[in-house]
Amino acid sequence: MNGFDGAYRTGEGKDNFAQFGTDPRRFLEVYQDFELPLDQAEAWKQDRAGAIASVDLARNLGWKIGDRIILEGVRQPITIELTLRGIYRSSMQSGPLFFNWDSVEQSLHRGQTQVFLIRADSPQGSAVRGSQQVVITE
């Protein structure tokens, strides 16, 4: 997963919220506790510019499925145009926007990942060690 520090412009100014680029297929395998309708999950997987937002984020910004979301890079000199393909529920309060990282990978540090998510039976069962490791146990 890769953090994207982007600004979302509204009629009232800019709204900032957490944004992460990822591989939708792998993401949904790891985050099995997300409630995302199957048709929306499939639409996200198929769209290189696809994104999913939490129920809270979508409600707060007035988004609905099919809306265009334009993020202006703050740290990275790129503007990305996304399409909302799904609205999920999870245990995260005001969950972030997740989008298909393929949409920006060619423009930004190709092949470099900032965060790895690992599913393991226990933290000790993880072969990867590092300061940005997140281990999800069942």
Image (cartoon, grey):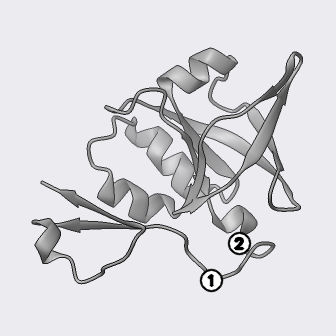
Q: Nearer the viewer, residue 42 or 80?
A: 80
- Image quarter for residue 102? bottom right
x and y, in percent, of residue 17 in the image: 64, 35
Could you classify mark 2 by the number of other residues whose Cα lies within 10 Å: few (under 14), some (14-19), or many (20 or more)? some
In the image shown, does 66 or 89 lie closer to the viewer? Answer: 89
Q: Nearer the viewer, residue 38 or 90?
A: 90
Earlier sequence position, callout 2 versus callout 1: 2
User: Which residue type carries mark 1?
Assistant: Gly
Residue under label 1, please give it: 111
Q: Are marks 2 and 1 in contact (CB under 8 Å)?
A: yes
Horizontal side of residue 130 vs 125, given as left or right: right
**Residue shown at the point (51%, 21%) measured from the top left:** 56
Q: Amino acid at mark 2?
A: Glu
Kindly identify which numbered label has been placed on residue 40.
none
Instruction: Tell me how far mark 2 sits from mark 1, CA to CA.
Output: 7 Å
How far across and down, in percent of the image, does residue 69 sit?
76, 37
Residue pictured at 45% horizontal, 40% vertical: 39
What secondary structure is marked by label 2?
helix
Quadrant of the image containing the C terminus: bottom left
